[in-house]
Image: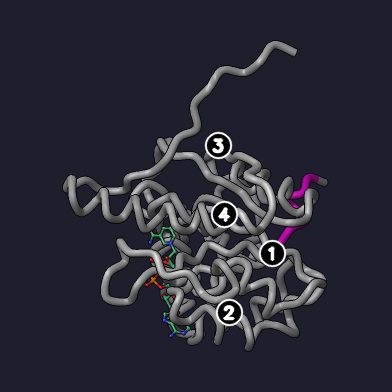
Amino acid sequence: MTERMILTLAILGGTGKEGQALAARWAKAGYHVIIGSRSRDKADKAVAAVNERLGEDVVHGMENAEAAAACDIAILTVPFGAHRSTLESMKDHLQGKLLVDVSVPVKLDDPAVVQMPPAGSAAQEAQAILGSDVDVVAAFQNVSHTHLKRDEPVPCDVLVCGDDEAARQQVLRLVKAAGLVGWDAGPLQNAVVVEGLTAVLLGINKRYKIKGAGIRITGEQEPA
Ligand SMILES: NC(=O)c1ccc[n+]([C@@H]2O[C@H](COP(=O)([O-])OP(=O)(O)OC[C@H]3O[C@@H](n4cnc5c(N)ncnc54)[C@H](OP(=O)(O)O)[C@@H]3O)[C@@H](O)[C@H]2O)c1
């Protein structure tokens, strides 16, 4: 049995732009995917849209709490304003699991300006709320849904930060399964850079009138 046949991924707040696009990519790669929402009805509508796109009924919908309880790995895709309250209400269901935090803390009135929480970054805030029995990993903040939703290769890389090496490697496998190139970007403390970079990219989108500015790591591999 491959890990894709075993693992269930729950995307909390998965009815939104980023969550639906990731759901489609992971379902296509063979993972069990649940789209979570505050409303079962809204989850079902998002599921119908994703399944129609995929041409098969592979994604399922649940309320966030039910999805968090049912999953092996949770992915959080809510606006930063809903970050703390969503995590606090999911805390018990996430113990012993891995949480991938996609959130970007930006100013409410200007998403091109970063606004880090007192914990240092959204991902560090998630770790503080959930406690040490949850492996929090930050990823996907620099990839716009405008790329993810298209059925074509994504010209952006994914930086993956987390304190647990095995958890980072697990998320790097999810990045690859979604069809992207991921890089181990070190401890969770480094998420401040990755999350902050998104505000920079959003400002570049605005100033240069482009869609989905992203990053790509360059360099030459040293011979072994
Ligand atoms: N969009 C992108 O291209 C992109 C790229 C990289 C990172 N991100 C980050 O990913 C996260 C999600 O982005 P998005 O564009 O997908 O967001 P979104 O579409 O605005 O919202 C995602 C979902 O969050 C839930 N939500 C909204 N307000 C909430 C509240 N007050 N309490 C609880 N849940 C709430 C909603 O789900 P329900 O109503 O169904 O509960 C909504 O469908 C953000 O932190 C964003 O910064 C986004």
Residue drawn at x 55%, y 48% is 28
Is the C-beta separation of discs 4 and 2 under 8 Å?
A: no
The answer for how far apart the CA atoms under marks 1 and 3 are is 20 Å
Mark 1 or mark 2, whichever is nearer to me? 1
Which residue carries the number 3 mark?
A: 181
Q: Quadrant of the C terminus?
A: top right
Q: Which residues are magenta?
A: 2-8
Total marks shown come to 4
Residue type highlighted by circle 2: Met
Which residue carries the number 2 mark?
A: 62
**Pointer 1 local density, CA inside 10 Å: few below 14, some 14–19, many at least 20:** many
| Residue 3 highlighted magenta (yes or no) | yes
Mark 1 or mark 3, whichever is nearer to me? 1
Mark 4 or mark 2, whichever is nearer to me? 4
What numbered label is drawn on residue 139? Answer: 4
Residue drawn at x 74%, y 58% is 7
The answer for how far apart the CA atoms under marks 1 and 4 are is 10 Å
**Pointer 3 local density, CA inside 10 Å: few below 14, some 14–19, many at least 20:** some
Q: Quadrant of residue 139?
A: bottom right
Disc 4 is placed on an element classified as loop
Q: Is residue 218 left or right of residue 172?
A: left
Q: Is residue 145 left or right of residue 181?
A: left
Disc 1 is placed on an element classified as strand
Disc 2 is placed on an element classified as strand
Viewer-proximal residue, 166 or 30?
166
Residue type highlighted by circle 3: Val
